Image: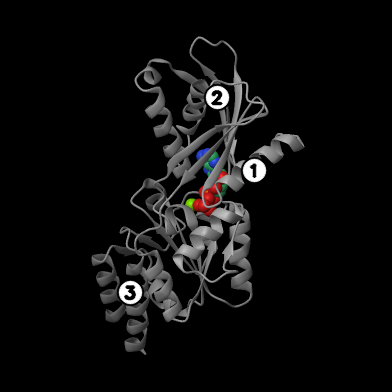
Amino acid sequence: GAPLATTCAIAAAASNGVLIKRPDTVERLPAVAVVALDKTGTLTKGEMTVLDVQRMNDCTWDETQALKLAAALEMKSAHPIAAAIVSRALGCIGTAYGSETATVKKVRDLPGVGIQGHLLVGSDAKVHKVLLGNSKALDLVNADAHSQEQFASFQEMHMNDTTVALIIDGKLQFGLALNDTLRPDSTRFIEELKGLGLRPYMLTGDSECAAKHISACAGLDPGSSLFSMTPDEKTEWVETQNAAGRKTLMLGDGINDATALAVATVGVAIGETGAALASQSAAVVLLTDKLHKLTQCIRMCKYAVRIER
Ligand code: ADP
Ligand code: MG
C-alpha cells in the first residue's frame, strides 16, 4: 500500500473536492513546473449567454427559422456554446419550438472549429446543411472575401466575447456573440500558482481577442495566452513542454481537451458534468468549482513528499 503521508494527502484532498484517482499523483504534483489551463469551462464558468444575434449582409434567412436550425444542431453538442444557443432559441421561439421536430443527421463535431449537420425542420421539406463555428468554419466552406470581412467586423464589434458564425448551405447568415464569466477565484488561483513558482498558460480554441480578454482578467502575463488552438495543437504543446523536461499539469473540462489531459504529467478534469467524470485521461478530478483547492492540494502533496523522505 501507499505510505501513510500519501494516504493522508489523498483523503484530505478528497474532503476538499479534489479527487486523486492515482496515488502516484501525490509525488508527481510537486514536480510540476508548467500549468496549462483551458479557457471555457475551466478559467470561466462555462455558463455562456448569447448577447447578440446579427444578420450578415447577404442573409436570406428569417432569424427565428435560422435559430431553430442552430438550436436543433447544438442539442447534439456538449459545448457551453451549445447550451447558450439552445436557451436563446427557446427564449425567442418559446413554446412553438417544441411542437416542430427537427431531424438532425450526419452530425460532425469539428474540434476547435464547431459543429455541422444536415437538418430538416417542420414543414420545410428541404434538407439544410448547417455549420456553426469560429472563423475556421468560414474557411471550411471557402467563404468569399466579403463574408470573411463581415464576420471579421462583427468580431471587432464584440472584441471581448466569443463569436460564432451561423452558416447555412455554405453561406454565412448570422453572427452570434456570447459572453462567459470568469470563475470567482480564477485570479486568486493564478496568483497562487505563481506563488508556488509555477508558470501558468491559457490554451484555448477561441479567438485572439476573447482569449486575451479572459487571460488579462485572470491575471495571466501577456504572452501566456495561446489562442485558436485545436485540441491536437493543445496536446502537441503539452508534449513539447514534456520533451523540454518541464513537467506539465493540464487543467480542462474534458470537452475537447481529453487527449491533452492524457499526455500531461498530471491531467486534472474539472466539473460535475459527465465529461469531467468520464475523463479516463485525468489523474485528478476537481469536484469543486473552487480552483484554489487545487493549489492547496499541490502544497499538501509537497508536504507529504517531504515527510516521506
Ligand atoms: P476552449 O479552448 O475555449 O475550451 P474549444 O476548443 O472547446 O474551446 O472550442 C474552440 C472554439 O470552437 C470555440 O471558441 C468555438 O468558436 C468553436 N466551437 C466549439 N464547439 C462549438 C459548438 N458546439 N458550436 C459553435 N462553435 C463551437
Ligand atoms: Mg473547454
Q: Residue under circle 1?
A: 153
> How dense is the environment of label 3, judged by Cα within 10 Å: few (below 14), some, or many (20 and up)?
some
217 or 275, which lies in front?
Answer: 217
Q: Quadrant of the N terminus?
A: bottom left
273 or 10, which lies in front?
Answer: 273
Q: Residue under circle 3?
A: 296
Number of numbered discs on residues = 3
Q: Position of residue 92 (x, y in %)?
A: 40, 26
Q: Residue 105 carries which label?
A: 2
Q: Where is residue 12 in the image (x, y as percent from the top left)?
A: 25, 72
**Labels 3, 1: front one:** 1
Say which element carries label 2.
strand
165 or 294, which lies in front?
Answer: 165
Q: Which mark is residue 129?
A: none
Q: What residue type is labelled 1?
A: Ser
Q: Position of residue 267 (x, y in %)?
A: 46, 63
Q: From the viewer's perspective, tell me whether residue 289 is left or right of residue 76.
A: left
> How dense is the environment of label 2, judged by Cα within 10 Å: few (below 14), some, or many (20 and up)?
some
Task: Evaluate whether residue 79 shows in this view.
Answer: no
From mark 1 to mark 2, how far is it between C-alphas? 32 Å
**Labels 1, 2: front one:** 1
Q: Where is residue 55 in the image (x, y as percent from the top left)?
A: 58, 30
Q: Do the residues labelled 3 and 2 touch (CB within 8 Å)?
A: no
Task: Evaluate whether residue 65 shows in this view.
Answer: yes
